[in-house]
Amino acid sequence: MNQFALVSLRCRPGNLVQRCVRVGLVMLVVLWVAHPGAFGAQQPPPAQEEFVPIDELPPEDRLPAAPFLIAAYSIVWILAFGYFWLVSRRLTDVERELTELSRRVGQDKGKAP
Amino acid sequence: MNQRILTGLLVVGAVMFVVAPVLIALAPYESTMGLVQKIFYFHVPVWFMMFLAVFICGIASGVYLFKEKPTADRLAVSAAELAVLFGLLGLTTGPLWARVSWGLWWPWDARTTLALILEMNFIAYLLLRKYGGPGSEKLAAGLAIFGMFNVPFVYVSVNVWRTLHPQTTVVPTLPLEMGAPFWFSVLAYLILFLVMLGVRRRLEEQRAVIDRLHLSLEEGYSS
């Protein structure tokens, strides 16, 4: 029987909440003693304060990063110019509608007594 | 914006976007991140443009709310759409950089979480404008002002909270060989942004003219 099943069997109604809290605390202490870095590891390392250039990129870093860089740049190009094209198309449609409406308004004014 | 100025800016911007990748490629590699750090040269400018769009939208919304100028409202909705677009670009290029540098796509730190909230704020603005019905312009304007005040928190979050993101000192302390392609890139994006804003605003202006013409036609039929 595993540890969690044993804990749930022991937690009977009555003082169930107190027992579960106690067992939980014991397990946390055990975990902390066994892996002292487990809680500390949740803290991220300090943020970088400046970028330092190097002359040559290490060979192991060349290939894995390239697809990500190319993907990022492609996404920017596709989305930015895709949006620009979309807005230009919408503008063309609106201007066509505007010309048509102006013509109709002009006709109506011509008919007016 | 004048049609001739827009065309001129478009040409200059296109040339700059052709030159920018060459300058970025020639820039030196960063010592801890290597090649993938070059995403920085367009990830950060994209966020600058997002913030600019948010400020334009927020200020124009304030003018619309307090002075009731319809032209300000049309500028605000145009800028809001660009804020969503540039935010989306930032939110997609960032994880690609993070995956290689930090080993995870999304760290849920203060900067990324606040940036996501800002993006959702302006998506909400556009949804409100589209489906909110009559009067939604003023509600959306309030939302835009709220979003604008979120920007300083996004910017300083890396200094205030513990985060994986580099601090705000990185950009001012860039060495010349990294700073030159970066600011060139910022300028290229600024030109692209201005062209987009000009075209998008023209679209709103033309829609307003169409609405007025529709009204005058209906009045003509009813009288």
Image (cartoon, grey):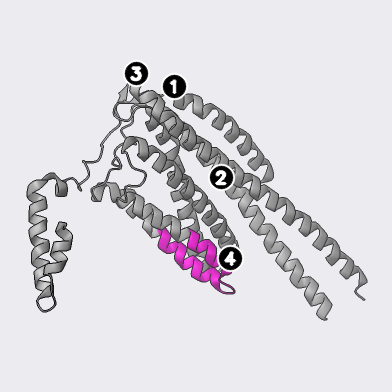
Query: Residue B130, labelled with which disc?
Result: 4
Residue A91 drawn above or below residue B174: below
Q: Which residues are magenta?
A: B123-148
User: Circle 1 marks a residue in which chain?
Assistant: B
**Which one is closest to the eye, mark 2 or mark 1?**
1
Callouts 2 and 3 on one subunit: no
Seen at 32% across and 47% down, the residue is: B107
Residue B66 seen in the figure: no
User: Circle 3 marks a residue in which chain?
Assistant: A
Seen at 45% across and 65% down, the residue is: B143
* Residue B195, position as x, y percentages in the image: 59, 44
Image quarter hosting the N terminus of chain A? bottom left
Query: Residue B26, labelled with which disc?
Result: 1
User: Circle 2 is placed at which residue position?
Assistant: B194
Q: Main secondary structure of the magenta part?
A: helix
* Residue B219, position as x, y percentages in the image: 78, 76
Separation (CA) of disc 3 from disc 4: 51 Å
Disc 2, SS = helix
